[in-house]
Image: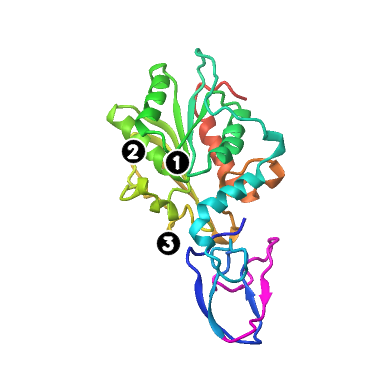
Amino acid sequence: MPVVACIEPALVSLQVGQQYAWCSCGLSQRQPFCDGSHAGTSWKPLIFTPKRTQLDWVCTCKFTRQPPYCDAAHNRLNELYQRKIQESELPRMEQEIVWMSDAAAHTRAPRVVLIHGLLAGQHMARHLLSWLREAGFEDASLFSNNTSPRVVADFLQVAKAQGRQIALVGYSQGGFQVIKVAKVLATRGLNVDVLVSIAAGGLGRLHPAQWAFPVRRIPRNIHTLLNIYSHADRLGTDPTSRGNALPSSVATQVENIALAKVEGVDHLALVRCYPVERQHPVVRERVLTPLLTALRGLSPHDGT
């Protein structure tokens, strides 16, 4: 999956007979042209020579079907990402995955709630949700980013009333929503034991549900917070040197996990768990391992 370098094409003066190398991976700092940043990956630049001298729109979102030229694919990025998700789903997990946990009513396991991003329900179900259940978290459930934060808070409050610990894991739009759920729980005097926000920023801020929402303002009822993002992910990371970084907090143990742009971890790869051989090694080490460590710190835990 290429990195979305920009959501608008570049107007470039192309010279007849001159050879150009168009960046196809999205990692180059010289967009729309290659600067060698793809080294160490399977990506290669597209070499082309214009047939005439002219100003032309060159693609920077990397989803054009007429490379290197823009075909307005940047206007339908959500649709194209969803198609990529569907094309990459695994045969081993073709069966429908039940989003809601069927854990026994008397379980003492922590309740883990995941909230997926825009159009990414099946992707999160087939990766993070299935992965956490395989890791032993029997009471793990998945909610849509369109579900009211109050409804999710009600679901978690039931577990709190049973003396169990709770965790929230949000991806993309879900990364915004888990903060909203935590704020609802704060008004009820309830703490969130672990909160994980993944890729809550970037172009995701353009969704009407997030307009003016202060996602970096963290409520004081969160004990441990993992804030995960990749500088190669324009969809989910703010385009600044700080990215989605959160300030330190007296009330909350905050850990910012920022993946460098050169590592090339895109929006989908951030939560890809299967097959294991397709896990990005950086994601395995710096996303999945810390996430699992934080959740296994909850007790009592019935998993292995």
Q: Residue at x 32, y 36 (%)?
A: 183
Asked if disc 3 and disc 2 are in contact, CB closer than 8 Å, the reply is no
> What type is the residue that disc 3 sits on?
Thr
Alpha-carbon span between mark 2 and mark 1: 23 Å
**Magenta part of the chain:** 29-53
Main SS of the magenta part reads loop
Q: Quadrant of the N terminus?
A: bottom right
Q: Which mark is residue 174?
A: 1
Name the residue that disc number 2 marks. Answer: 251
Alpha-carbon span between mark 1 and mark 3: 21 Å
On the image, the x and y values in percent for residue 252 come to 37, 39
> What type is the residue that disc 2 sits on?
Ala
Q: Which mark is residue 242?
A: none
Image quadrant assignment for residue 90? top right
- The reply, left or right, for residue 197 in relation to residue 279 is left
21 over 243 or under it: above or below: below
Q: Residue at x 66, y 82 (%)?
A: 19
On the image, the x and y values in percent for residue 66 come to 62, 67
Q: Of callouts 2 and 1, which one flags the residue occurring earlier in the amino acid sequence?
A: 1
> What type is the residue that disc 1 sits on?
Gly
- The reply, left or right, for residue 206 in relation to residue 98 is left
Q: Which mark is residue 240?
A: 3
Q: Of callouts 3 and 2, which one flags the residue occurring earlier in the amino acid sequence?
A: 3
